[in-house]
Image (spheres, rainbow, N blue to C red):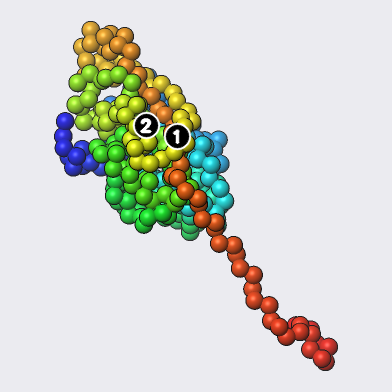
Amino acid sequence: MKNEQELKDIVKDRYAKIAEQGKAENAASCCGATTPSNKVYNIMMDDYSETGGYVEDADLGLGCGLPTQFAKIKKGDTVIDLGSGAGNDCFVARHETGAEGKVIGIDFTPIMIEKARANAEKLGFNNVEFREGDIDAMPVSNNVADVIVSNCVLNLVPNKQKVIGEIFRVLKPGGHFSISDIVLVGNLPDALKEDVEMYAGCVAGAIQKTEYLQFIEDAGFQNIQIQKEKPIVIPNDILEKYLSEEEVKTFNNAGTGIFSVTVYAEKPGTKPEKPKRQLAEINDEPCCSPDGNCC
C-alpha cells in the first residue's frame, strides 16, 4: 500500500473527478469514478431527498449514512462538517442551526470547495463557509464547534487517530459529534486492501470496528453510542474484478462484515452558554417632553 501522502493524493485526484460527474454516475460505482455496476447503486448512500435543507445540486451521492439526522443540532449552534464535498450535509445542518448559527465545511479538494461555495452563494447562505484543508490538521481554532458531523470520510484518511484527536481539539467542552463511516469486522482479502480504487471507494481504508471505537475512547470522548449500523454488501460483479471465482465464494462465506456505522460521542465538560442578545440601552430622559411632544 502507498504511504500517507500518496494515499491522500490518490483520494484528492479521484474526488476531483467525482466532483465533475453527476450524482447518478457516482452512485452507480462503489469506488467513484470507475466502471458502473447496476448492483452497486445505493449500497452505501442513504436517501437525503426528504431531509430538511436538502439541496439536490449539492448531493453527489457519496455518503454512507445520514449523520445530520442524529446530530442533535440546535438553533444557533456552530457546526463543522468534515469532508464537506459539494456542501449537502452543511446545508442540511444549516437548516437545523438556522440563520443565527454557523456552519463550516472542510474539504481538501479545491474543486469541491469551489462547487460548495457556488451552491452556498446560489442559496444566499451567508452563515455557511467552506475552508480548504486536511481534516487531520483542521484550519479551525480550538474549542470552536458545538457539533461535528461527517459522512463517509474518515476511512479515506490514513491517520484516523489523528483526525479523532483533531475532532476533540476543535469541539467545545460539552460538544459532541455524530459521524457516519465504514468499519470492518474481519479481514479483507489482500487484493481488496491493496487496491487504490477500493481505497478511494471507502472500502480498503476502513479499519476494524473495535479499533475505531477504541480510538474514540482513547481520545477522551465519553457517552460513545452507535446510533445506526447497516451492512454494506459488495456485489460479485465488483469483487470479480479483484478476486477469482473461488476467492469470491471464500470471501462471501468468510463472515467478514463491512458496515456503515453512525457513532455519537461527547467531549467532557460543560458547554459555555451562548451570549444572549443585549437589549438596547434605555435613555434616562423621559420619552415625552414637557411640551407634550412624544418621541
Residue drawn 42% across and 29% down?
261
Kind of residue indicated by mark 1: Ile
Please identify the quarter of the rendering in which residue 162 is found.
Answer: top left
Residue 34 picture location, percent across and down: 27, 29
Q: 291 or 200, which is in the foreground?
A: 291
- Tag 2: Cα neighbours inside 10 Å, few (<14), some, or many (≥20)? some
Residue that lies at the very extreme toward the bottom in this rendered image: 291
Q: Number of marks in the image? A: 2
> Which residue is found at the position 27% from the left and 31% from the top?
205
> For residue 194, which quarter of the picture?
top left
Identify the residue at horizontal 38%, vertical 41% (top origin): 220
- In-image side of 98 versus 269 (left or right): right
Q: Which image quadrant: the C terminus?
A: bottom right
> Circle 2 — which element?
helix
Circles 2 and 1 in contact, beta carbons < 8 Å: yes
Q: Position of residue 94 (x, y in %)?
A: 51, 49
Instruction: Please tell me the numbered disc located at residue 40.
Output: none
Q: CA distance from mark 2 to mark 1?
A: 8 Å
Q: Position of residue 210 (x, y in %)?
A: 34, 26
Q: Name the one closer to the observer, 88 or 119.
A: 88
Residue ID for mark 1: 224
The numbered mark, 2 or 1, whose residue comes first in the sequence reads: 2
Q: Is residue 284 left or right of residue 25?
A: right
Q: Secondary structure at mark 1?
A: strand
In the displayed structure image, the side of residue 171 where residue 195 appears, left or right: left
Identify residue for label 2.
Answer: 213
The answer to whether residue 30 is visible is no
Which residue shows up at 21% across the image and 31% down it?
Answer: 196
Q: Residue furthest right?
A: 292
Badge 2 amino acid: Leu
Badge 1 local density, few (<14 within 10 Å), some, or many (20+)?
some
Viewport quadrant of the N terminus: top left
